[in-house]
Amino acid sequence: RRPFFRVNLLSIWNFLIYNCLCFYFKLQTRSRQMKDNDMSYFSFVLGEGMFSVPVTNVREVFDYETLTPVPNSLKYLKGVMNIRGSVVSIVDLRELFGFYPPDDLTGCSIIYLEIPQAGEKPFEFAIIADNVDVVSHLNMIPADSVSSAMLEEHRHFVKSVARQEDRFILVLDLEKIIEFIEKDVDKAGMAGF
């Protein structure tokens, strides 16, 4: 009878540890979602979709101006622009996401972003948006509850999903986008992003 008792205690112990870990991870996820709901987000339109980034990453927004193209660059790297003395790469996320944007960029906006880097100067780049929306708090929902054929190939670029009235807003993971672009630039053998 003792070996049976020992096996049952071990099974019970494993069951308790498993449930405690599951509970811990659920709390972590819920805590992250609550933190995300407390933040303000800057929303903008790319193609047919609404996207958003934390407002703390948005440095400035202005109307589209002429860019200086970079020869032999990736299709979604539209060029560079001098913004307040800094040479900043301009990324067309519409191209990166496969939205087939129009060639005429007049009427578009430039969103100048800044990503903090541990112990280093913030990483700066800008994106082209078809239209800019508002700064607001967003009501986050589980990302797996929304099927987005819009970004199926680049699902890893979406950090979370929000719902605002009758529309869904995809909150972008800027760090993953930068990481992808840097790898793409390295793969193409270019001189940096």
Image (cartoon, grey):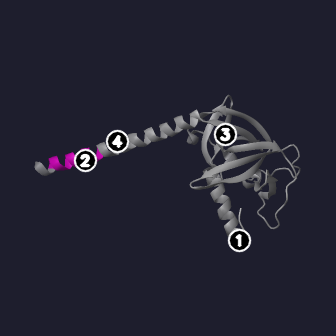
Viewed as shown, does residue 142 lie left or right of 178?
left
Viewed as shown, does residue 8 lie left or right of 112?
left
Circle 4: is it few (<14), some (14-19), or many (20+) Cα within 10 Å? few
Q: CA distance from mark 1 to mark 2?
A: 54 Å
Q: Mark 4 or mark 2: which comes first in sequence?
A: 2
Of circles 1 and 2, the one toward us is 1
Q: Which residue is mark 2?
A: 11
The secondary structure type at the circle numbered 1 is loop
Please state the horizontal and vertical placement of residue 130, each as a whole percent of the image: 80, 43
* Residue 94 lies in the magenta stretch: no
Q: Mark 3 or mark 4: which comes first in sequence?
A: 4
Q: Mark 3 or mark 2: which comes first in sequence?
A: 2
Please state the horizontal and vertical placement of residue 77, each as a whole percent of the image: 77, 58
Q: Which residue is mark 1?
A: 189
Of circles 4 and 2, the one toward us is 4
Q: Amino acid at mark 1?
A: Gly
* Outermost top residue: 165
Residue contact between numbered discs 1 and 2, judged by CB atoms under 8 Å: no
Numbered circle sitting on residue 55: 3
Q: CA distance from mark 4 to mark 2?
A: 14 Å
Please state the horizontal and vertical placement of residue 108, each as a whole percent of the image: 83, 44
Q: Mark 1 or mark 4: which comes first in sequence?
A: 4
